[in-house]
Image: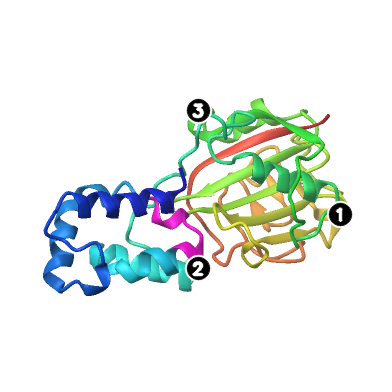
Amino acid sequence: MKEIVIWENLIKWGIAKNPTLDSDMTTWSINEYEILKGTISPFIQHIRFFQMAPQEYYSKVRPLGKLLPKELEEDLLSYYIVPNSRLATKILPPRISQNDKVFGSLILTRKYFNLISYWIDDGEELLPNPLKNGQYEYNLLLRGSRDGFELEDFQYKCNNKGATIAVIKLKDSCKILGGYNPIKWSASAGWVFSDKSFIFSFYLNILDSSSILLSKAKNMSYAISDSNTNRNQGFGRGDLYILKKSCKLSDYSVRIHESENFEIDDYEMFQVIKK
């Protein structure tokens, strides 16, 4: 069930629980809104408002903002108007049904893997319509929360596995950072040339061209940072360091995150396998 449908049904349920409320909310006074707010308030914390499409928020949630805690209402306005603004509200992880779980990921569903497959095949930032299943499969090598966040964990799980995709979910956000290494990780203690690597960012449940950043290597000699002793595994000379959790513009075409440092909820590494 889509998050917006859960919200709409919560409103209908709350009205049904209060027979004195008119079904036409346009006629309500402040007192009637307070009655409904008191009924549904215990459940508001379970609605994933930040994973709704912008148009869903604008037309279905914003007009009923008085039903929300003030802090949440302000955070939602900031989130949809000024992306990446600092929020006080904890953002819940996306609901992932059993049917959506693919390749062992707890972060991405199939449509996002399809997008990454499209990029691997030299697709551009502009999304095709429709976004079809790609010609790649993804083997989960590492999940930080399961396998660890240290350099040794990364090297043990990911080195010498061929092409890989890194997927990073930022803390208290629906934003995803990631990158594609078409060569391999091998702790070679230097930079690795690649003309096919890329890094990216997008938002879960807001998959449109305006919210996607795709950045390809422009200085190909420094495309992959393959450190063996520090935490500089990643892309470019700091364009995306996975373990160091930092990001700036150096050797790729576009900066994918405005802040140089970031915090993460979790990250996953996948081996890329051509079907």
Q: Secondary structure at mark 2?
A: loop
Which label sits in the foreground, 3 or 2?
Answer: 2
Q: Is residue 114 above or below residue 219?
A: above
Which label sits in the foreground, 1 or 3?
Answer: 3
The answer to whether residue 245 of the structure is visible from this angle is yes
Q: Secondary structure at mark 1?
A: helix
> Is 17 contained in the magenta span?
no
Q: Which residue is mark 2?
A: 83
Q: Of the residues shown, which amino acid type is indicated by label 2?
A: Pro
Neighbours of disc 3 within 10 Å: few (<14), some (14-19), many (20+): few
State the residue at coordinates (79%, 37%).
188
Q: Of the residues shown, which amino acid type is indicated by label 1?
A: Ser
In this picture, residue 173 sits left or right of residue 109: left
Identify the magenta region.
Answer: 48-56
Quarter of the view holding residue 73: bottom left
For the residues labelled 1 and 2, the Cα–Cα distance comes to 33 Å
Q: Which residue is mark 1?
A: 221
